[in-house]
Image (spheres, coloured by chain):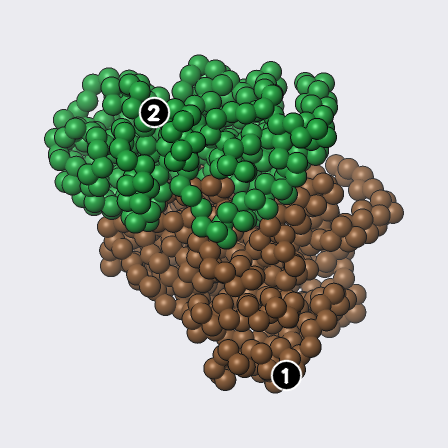
Chain colours: A green, B brown
Amino acid sequence: METLIDDWRARIAAAAGSGGKLAIRGGGSKCFYGGPETGERLDVAAYSGIVAYEPTELVVTARAGTGLRELAATLAEKGQGLVFEPPHFGAAATVGGMLASGLSGPRRQAVGAVRDFVLGVKLLNGSGEVLTFGGQVMKNVAGYDVPRLLAGSLGTLGVVLEVSIKVLPLPVAEKTLRFALDEAAALQKLNQWGGRPLPISASAWHDGLLTLRLSGAAAAVAAAERELAGEVLADADAFWDSLREQKQAFFLGDAPLWRLSLPSVTPPQALGETLIEWGGAQRWLRGGDARRIRAAAAKAGGHATLFRGDDALKTEVGVFQPLTAPLARIHRHLKQAFDPQGVFNPGRMYPGL
Amino acid sequence: MEGNSADRRFAVDRPTLIRRLRAVLPAQALLVEEEDLRPYDCDGLTAYRQLPLLVALPENESQAQAILKVCHELKAPVVARGAATGLSGGATPHADGVVVSLARLKKIVSIDALSRTAVVQPGVRNLAVSEAAAPYGLYYAPDPSSQIACTIGGNVAENSGGVHCLKYGLTVHNVLRVRGLTMAGEIVEFGNAALDAAGYDLLALLNGSEGLLAMITEVTVRLTPKPQLAQVVIASFDDVRRAGDAVAGIIAAGIIPAGLEMMDKKAIHAVEPYVNAGYDMDAEAILLCESDGTPEEVAEEIGRITAVLERSGASAYCVSRTEAERLKFWAGRKAAFPAVGRLTPDYLCMDGTIPRKRLAEMLQEITLLSGKYDLRCANVFHAGDGNLHPLIMYDANQPGQLERAMAFGAEILELSVRFGGTITGEHGVGIEKVNLMAEQFGMAEIETFHRLKAAFDEHGLLNPGKGVPTLARCREYIQARVARAPTAPRF
């Protein structure tokens, strides 16, 4: 394993010295996300394996190339898991890709995102130095919180080598309910329920149907099921898996897929065909006018990402919502702090970054 | 002990600074006389005192902005200050700098029950947020022991925890947006009213940045529905190791309690006569384990917790029967620091975090160190997340005691790092532990921290001397560490 790191350091040094660029790739399952890849491929999937896992410490440390499937299976043996339900988007998905993309699944609103669970990282910076930040304990405020900064940084700050993640017990009981509601009514209900101590762990609204998952202690799930009185959905795991992996009909086809991250109480936006998750805080759109979508998201206090689209559209409208001038400057300086020669994943997040 | 008295990098001309600040502030918003500056000479880490050059008390964001613009232009250091309850000296003044107290920015701007969020100014007290949210059945989950006094701005700066963070998270997990000012006086927004924002997660960086990256002027926090019921189990152990095993046993059983706290005999003996919480004075250690949720859920979980406690050899336990009793049981834990304060003229509170499995071992080490330095030490732990608060008792008026207490504390923190943990779980590095950063991080990481800070604050004017040591200080620390006999394992 250490020889791999030596090889990568040599490649980083060579690239840094010659104005070269490196495109970091784990399993390649999330290549579609972010700006187009440029530069020489740096394959990191071989750097894999679980380094340490102690169920009573609620933490697992894995090398970046470790498969998400393998990790989930190991954790499940002890009744634990990554409860933010990271999407895999392919069998080859890795821990490094999970961190770099920063994407979380259906349970995000209830428990938090990748960034809320990452405790420590080891990475190679643009000077080829191995750096360690954070650790394996739940509470740690020594130094700036670089591990969380790396979540969603799309490999632009360094090659992640190892990640320590907080794990939690998997829910004892689950039940999925369904309600026939229009978009406005569903949003209203979701926000009202969100203000009450109900064990809601996931929600999805599309085409007049609200699907709601309850997770937790058996008694709590049963009590909520009685109270909410929806229609029980059989084969619910398949529903939530296909939602997380974007295999439902809504996500198929070639039309651009937009992800809007909005305050959960934002009223229906009438921007096109919509699928709502996270209690109203994550909304998916197929197609539509980029400028209108970005303006609506900003006006509501959120942002819009061109989640899937062809390179031409990505180049034209940008993948991510533009930053204000002071934030853009801070981004450029942070990039320089980790990767002074701009070797890693140029343009995956913003042009010039 | 003086804060940054050795740091003379900033040649600030005081009369010029006063003249320039007077031009942009109302008269009552600037303190210049020594008698007015004196109350600002320290925060909760009273062992370090330093008179600031000036104290500014902005009443709104634009005044704060004006102060920063002047200080930026004149290259004067700025130290932001909330309620000054911090325990690591994060708000210790700089000799050549301005303390900017945000105490007057204390408005709760809005509470939105439907979206479960509150927008508050940085000077709003932690508990005041929960009180304002209570009519909607909501509360702000992070609850540091100082929550009656400490402010949200300070909580964000330190990424504060509390006794319920195992289940409900730290400040970073409960803040959606921070509005603030860069040192140059630009308005910046980190995060937003949604669950995430475009670009790097700068909001995560702001949390726990100890006032080194930006000055906070407004915060949007997430509110949590109040659980229908909470009950706490209090268990006694005649052996600390068994109490530690019980902690691991509870987690291994798949339970994430709302709170899981431990106190050793010295802490129990400090607390019980002070608050009469009903703690077992014969126990070597007690555990407080809270369950919350629906009544059915709590009944089920308490049953599982007590089963683990019995298996782990608790000598006795009882479950709170009423809300009043639950609060009484917690009152002891929450009053632990002041209770210890009654037993000693001064104390230092350490804040290391270690893997839970090493709790008992750590306690034994602390007992040995207590003998070595001839100072008493009471221990309270956030056992659920391995965060230790050894309270080292000393008398600053006795020559050599402060130095001994600090060496004692440093050894505990070195052990925390050696055990796979950290020098600070929730109190921050501040001025107190700045040299110990070299214990936990290598030079390359420290250099990265400096570059990261420079990305926000090019001239290093925000809270200089805190959080991250200069490379020169790191080298000095490492040399001194090597010169000292290497810490031999003592088992």
Q: Amino acid at mark 2?
A: Arg
Which residue has dot 2 on it?
A244
Residue B421 on image: x %, y %: 63, 40
In which image quadrant can residue B354 be found?
Answer: top right
Q: Nearer the viewer, residue B268 or B39?
A: B39
Between the C-alphas of marks 2 and 1, the distance is 62 Å
Say above or below: B144 vs A220. below
Residue B91 on image: x %, y %: 59, 65
Q: Nearer the viewer, residue B181 or A215?
A: B181
Q: Amino acid at mark 1?
A: Glu
Left or right, A223 with reference to A295: left
Assign a secondary structure to mark 1: helix
Assign a secondary structure to mark 2: helix
- Which residue is drawn at the image coordinates 82% and 52% (left, top)? B476
The answer to whether residue B247 is seen in the rendering is: no
In which image quadrant can residue A88 be found?
Answer: top left
Say above or below: B353 vs A154. below
